[in-house]
Image (cartoon, rainbow, N blue to C red):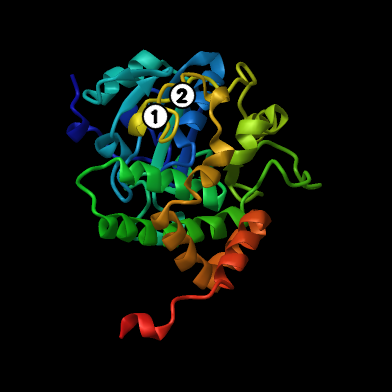
Amino acid sequence: MTSVAAMPRQTAAAPWQALGIEPSRALRLVGMRRSGNHAICNWLQRNAPGGRSLFLNNCRPGMDPLRSCHGVEVSGQPRAVEPMTEAAQSAGEGALLLVSYEDTVHARFDDARQLSGPYTDAAFDCDVLIYRSALNWLASLLRKLQANAAFRAADRMAVLVRALATYADLLDEVATADRPDRPARTDRTDRPARSGRSGRVAICYDNWTRDELYRARVLGDLGLPLRDNDLGEVQSYGGGSSFQKDVRQAGDLRSDQRWLAMRDDPEYQAVLRLAALDHAFCRRVAAHFPEDAERLTRIAGLPGFGPEVLT
């Protein structure tokens, strides 16, 4: 059996020869943690051509995804990471390939250091950007961090502040991507490819959860057949839902109400106050989630404590 370490590197003619199969489509996905990444990846697998797919979870940015992924699924079922060629053979020739990244953005990489290591942008048919409304995303991320007993409040705030910066950069990339909620372009003559269009499709998790027509349009934009448009089961990655541990069907999740569940939490209020002071961040949020931006504006107008508190 061929080890991952012995796999050949990408060539222009056959970028995925190291897998031993030729995918029908290769999609690279980028999104922040707690943004519905795994729900969307599971749905994409259920709509793979012929129902065959290979999913590489949470790959390390800047590294070879075949060597740095944290979990592999074949057609929606978990498989051992090693050897990768066996997992690929199980998926079969023409399988859909999904390569997933978390908490990073394309802008942090260039020709000298590629996001996918030896695999250039040309190896992928499309880049998928997954994003979620700011206040719901922050609420879910904070609740997840609070479940970790090893984290102190300062540890959680450090993670959240870094995540806010990456989230803002992701919204910048979403602004230039193709989005199913935008009017169709008149020059569109084919499904997304790296020639002629942005090469990126943005999926808003909030819209994806509530609108089956939106989901169908996403599949069309990605060049995938519509086979199963349900939301599916709650995925177990990251411990499943941060709020509803006993829920099994994703359609039963109240993912649009996470900010309401956390609105009295002092740590949540603290990070929202910090975010509200970042005017550039608020402008980015306003472009995609105006209701969240209005709430941040109200928070920014609240009085702080007086200097006498510090004396």
Name the residue at 45% across, 67% down: 274
In this orientation, does residue 84 appear?
Answer: yes
Q: In the rendering, at what x and y percent does residue 184 appear? A: 77, 44
Residue lying at the far right of the rendered structure: 186
Helix or strand or loop: what does disc 2 sit on? loop
Q: Which residue is mark 2?
A: 234
User: Which amino acid type is marked by label 2?
Assistant: Val
Q: Nearer the viewer, residue 169 or 108?
A: 169
Q: Is residue 1 left or right of residue 213?
A: left
Q: In this rendering, is residue 176 above or below 243?
A: below
Name the residue at 36% across, 41% down: 144
**Which of the marked residues, 1 or 2, is nearer the chain's N terminus?**
2
Q: Quadrant of residue 271?
A: bottom left
Name the residue at 36% across, 46% down: 116
Q: In the rendering, at what x and y percent does residue 56 appear? A: 36, 31
Q: In the rendering, at what x and y percent does residue 85 appear? A: 28, 22
Q: Is residue 44 left or right of residue 166?
A: right
For label 1, the crowd category at 10 Å Cα-Cα, with few meaning under 14, some 14 to 19 and many 20 or more, is some
Helix or strand or loop: what does disc 1 sit on? loop
Please report contact status of discs 1 and 2: CB closer than 8 Å, yes or no. yes
Q: Nearer the viewer, residue 186 or 154?
A: 154
How far is disc 1 from disc 2 in space, using C-alphas? 6 Å
User: Which amino acid type is marked by label 1?
Assistant: Gly
Q: Is residue 237 left or right of residue 221?
A: left
Q: Nearer the viewer, residue 311 or 241?
A: 311
Name the residue at 24% across, 54% down: 152
Q: Which residue is mark 1?
A: 240
Quadrant of the frame with the N terminus: top left
Quadrant of the frame with the C terminus: bottom left
